[in-house]
C-alpha cells in the first residue's frame, strides 16, 4: 500500500510543479490568503493525526496538501504578475479560518484539531472557489487533478488503519479538488461559448 501512496505523492509534486511554474510565469494568480491557509491547515491536521494515531502512510498525501501550497504561497510573493487582488471577503475568510485554528490550539484535542483544520481549510477555499467561478482562466486545474490522485491514494492507504484521524482531512481534500476541477473546466467552457454583446 505504501507504494501507492508514494506514487500519489509523486503525482502531487509533479502536478504541483506545473502550478508553481505557472505562478512564476504569471499565468495563474493564486489567492494569497487561500494558499497560505491551505498550507497551514493540512500541516496542523498532520500534526494532530500523528498525535492521535502516530505516523502512518495515510498522512503523507495530507502533508503534501500543505507543503505544495506553502511553495505556491512563497512563489507568489516573488512574482508581481502572480498576484490576485485581495478583497474584504478574502481577509474575512482568512480571519475566520485563523480563528478556527486558534480554537483548536486552545483545546489540544487531536480530533477537534482535524475538524477545525477542515473548517479552516474550507473557509480559506471560498475566495479561490469564487475566483475560479468568476475568472476560471486565473487557475490551473492540473494542480487539482494531482490532488485528486494523491488524496485517492491516501484514502486507499488508510483502509488498513481506518479512523477519523486517518481519513477525514483526506476525504475533504478529495471533494475540494474534484469541486475545483469541475468549476474551472465548466466555467471555462461556459465563458468560451458566451456570445459577445455589442
Image (spheres, rainbow, N blue to C red):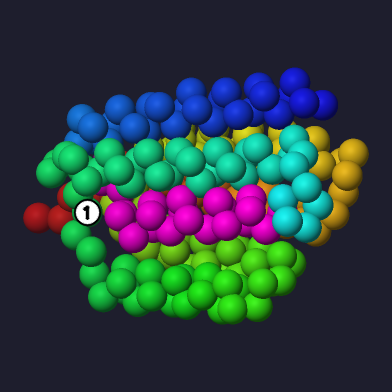
Q: Is residue 1 shown above or below 165? A: above
| Percent of width and height locating residue 49 | 72, 54
Asked if residue 175 can be seen in this view, the reply is: no
For this view, does 49 lie left or right of residue 162? left
Mark 1 Cα-neighbour bin, 10 Å: few <14, some 14–19, many ≥20: some
Q: Nearer the viewer, residue 107 or 68?
A: 107
Q: Is residue 196 shown above or below 5? A: below
Q: Residue furthest toward the left?
A: 198
For this view, does 16 lie left or right of residue 42? left
Magenta: predominant secondary structure element? helix
Task: State the quadrant of the C terminus.
Answer: bottom left
Identified at 29% across, 31% down, the residue is: 22
Q: Quadrant of residue 74?
A: top left
| Percent of width and height locating residue 60 | 65, 37
Q: Which residue is mark 1?
A: 84
Q: Nearer the viewer, residue 30 or 45?
A: 45
Identified at 48% across, 56% down, the residue is: 40
Amino acid at each position: 500500500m505504501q507504494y501507492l501512496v508514494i506514487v500519489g505523492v509523486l503525482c502531487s509534486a509533479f502536478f504541483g510543479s506545473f502550478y508553481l511554474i505557472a505562478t512564476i510565469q504569471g499565468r495563474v494568480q493564486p489567492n494569497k490568503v487561500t494558499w497560505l491557509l491551505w498550507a497551514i491547515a493540512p500541516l496542523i491536521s498532520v500534526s494532530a493525526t500523528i498525535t492521535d494515531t502516530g505516523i502512518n502512510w495515510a498522512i503523507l498525501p495530507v502533508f503534501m496538501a500543505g507543503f505544495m501550497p506553502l511553495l505556491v504561497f512563497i512563489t507568489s510573493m516573488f512574482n508581481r504578475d502572480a498576484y490576485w487582488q485581495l478583497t474584504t471577503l478574502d481577509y474575512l475568510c482568512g480571519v475566520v479560518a485563523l480563528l478556527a485554528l486558534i480554537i483548536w490550539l486552545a483545546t489540544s484535542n487531536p480530533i477537534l484539531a482535524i475538524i477545525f483544520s477542515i473548517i479552516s481549510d474550507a473557509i480559506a477555499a471560498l475566495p479561490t472557489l469564487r475566483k475560479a467561478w468568476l475568472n476560471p482562466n486565473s487557475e490551473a486545474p492540473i494542480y487539482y487533478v494531482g490532488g485528486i490522485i494523491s488524496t485517492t491514494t491516501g484514502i486507499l492507504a488508510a483502509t488498513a488503519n481506518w479512523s477519523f484521524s486517518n481519513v477525514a482531512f483526506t476525504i475533504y481534500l478529495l471533494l475540494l479538488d474534484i469541486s475545483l476541477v469541475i468549476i474551472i473546466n465548466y466555467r471555462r467552457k461556459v465563458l468560451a461559448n458566451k456570445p459577445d454583446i455589442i
